[in-house]
Image: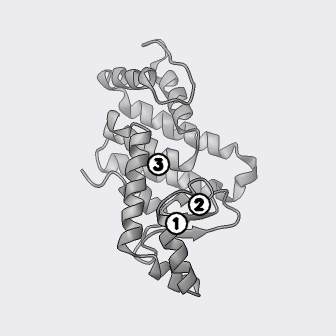
Amino acid sequence: MKNKFEFTLSQEGCTDKNPVGYVNDPQDAGGETVAGISRRYHPQWEGWKFVDEIKKATVSPFDLIKALDTTEIHNAIYAFYKQYWHKYKCDEMPIGLGIAMFDTAFMTGQAVRLLQMSINFVVEDKINMITVDNVIGMQTLSAIELIRRASLVESLVNVYIYKRIVYQMELRDKRKFYRGWAERAGKLGFYLYKNKLL
């Protein structure tokens, strides 16, 4: 299959013109970010030392973006992504759900809670519902496995993406980002279908 980080990297602005997706929007709660890695929420990320060194030596935003395209920063991004993938146990899920989980975790700290709510919606009257505790443990992984056996993974992912959109639309102080968030969720569903990952 294609790189499991491909979708999230593309949505975090990693393009030919901005290879590491550098953004510093003062209205974004995450503040300064590289490939979606927020300095505010992940100040210990090893890539920041390289970013800070480069910022001292560059003047214009255009020069900064070009200068950030280094092997050290790309390696630091990949290491962080791998850690995040394992933190949310994405390898223990069907691949399409894992990608959806990974991308949602980048968007909100409620990724697991939204997944558990989605599981309970899909499995109601089919298997026991699970506790919504925002912890990715055995109860959640066991429920996912039962859903997989029942061939309901596609339904679960569809509900998950829907609940993600609803949750984000309820963040009243973030109206500026509504359209982008909704578009990203839609693109996620399309990406999973197009690449036959469900």
Residue type at mark 1: give it: Trp
Reading the image, the residue beneath label 1 is 48
Residue type at mark 3: give it: Asp
Residue 75, placed above or below residue 145: below
Q: Position of residue 142 (x, y in %)?
A: 38, 21
Mark nearer the N terminus (2 vs 3): 2
Label 2 residue SS? loop
Q: Which residue is drawn at 29% across and 50% down?
A: 195
Q: Nearer the viewer, residue 13 or 64?
A: 64
- Among all residues in the image, which is located at the extreme left? 1
Residue 66, placed above or below residue 44: below
Mark nearer the N terminus (2 vs 1): 2
- Mark drawn on residue 103: 3
Q: Between label 3 and label 1, give the one nearer the viewer.
A: 1
Q: Nearer the viewer, residue 41 or 132?
A: 41
Label 1 residue SS? helix
Q: Which residue is drawn at 33% across and 33% down?
A: 92
Q: Position of residue 127 (x, y in %)?
A: 43, 13
Reading the image, the residue beneath label 2 is 39
Asked if disc 2 and disc 1 are in contact, CB closer than 8 Å, the reply is yes
Q: Between label 2 and label 3, give the one nearer the viewer.
A: 2
